[in-house]
Image (cartoon, rainbow, N blue to C red):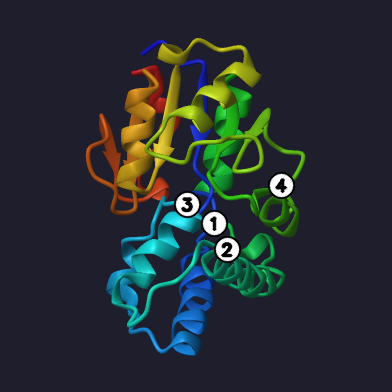
Amino acid sequence: MNIKAVIFDLDGVIVSTDECHYLAWKKIADEEGIYFDREINNRLRGVSRMESLEIVLERANKEYSQEEKLALAEQKNNCYREYIKSMTPDDILPGVMATLEKLKSSGIKIAIGSSSKNTPVILKQIGLENYFDAVSDGNNIKNSKPDPEVFVKAADMLGIAYNECMVVEDADAGIQAGKSGGMLTLAVNGANGGDLSLENLACGDLVEIIQA
């Protein structure tokens, strides 16, 4: 494989913020009297905040105006940001740092490609705010996954051709986005449809896969 860069999703790949998202959405849903559980929460993986809200509101007993939806999305984000303030480097998933260090030492560029606007906060909390060669996130894109924009922008920041990039994702929407961007995809932690698959980053050596 002629891979020169690896672009990682953040949530569910570098760190797990699933519980923070779940608790924040659950709080909003409970306050609105809307049924919400972990199965519904799983549908929100890799989906933008407003699209996630639409899924949450599917069980609502009333219609919400656009202004009300924006207010609910902001409330959810405020709750979520409070939860992630407690994150530390200990929240980095097993095997991630060893993989990143091996990629760096092998001369392979590494980047973040996340739809989350909270990416800078999370990276700072876990001590990786200046670690990656490029960070593309919800603050510099207009279209969320499965649109490939976030990955395409990351590749452009790195100056690497799209077909020389690998995307590492835990959500089906992210895998679809990577493929749409002309990139090789690696599915981890439950995602489907990747060109390659690792159950967990700790279970294999990404560099060996790339150089195979």
Real-space CA distance between mark 4 and mark 2, rounded to the nearest whole angstrom: 30 Å
Real-space CA distance between mark 4 and mark 1, rounded to the nearest whole angstrom: 11 Å
Q: Quadrant of residue 86?
A: bottom right
Instruction: Tell me if 212 is positioned left or right of 73 in this view.
Output: left
Q: Few, some or many C-alpha atoms within 10 Å of disc 4 (few <14, some 14-19, many ≥20)? A: few
Residue at figure coordinates x 36%, y 13% from the top left = 1
Residue 128 - label: 4
Real-space CA distance between mark 1 and mark 2, rounded to the nearest whole angstrom: 27 Å
Would you name the residue on which mark 3 appears? 48
In the rendered structure, which disc, 1 or 2, sits on the residue that comes first in sequence? Answer: 1
Q: What residue type is labelled 1?
A: Val
In the rendered structure, which disc, 3 or 2, sits on the residue that comes first in sequence? Answer: 3
Could you tell me which secondary element the residue under label 4 belongs to? loop
Vertical placement of residue 95 versus 156, above or below: below
Q: Few, some or many C-alpha atoms within 10 Å of disc 1 (few <14, some 14-19, many ≥20)? A: many
Would you name the residue on which mark 2 appears? 70
Q: Nearer the viewer, mark 4 or mark 2?
A: 2
Depth order, front residue of 30/202: 30
Q: Where is residue 139 shown, x and y percent of the image?
A: 66, 42
Would you name the residue on which mark 1 appears? 15
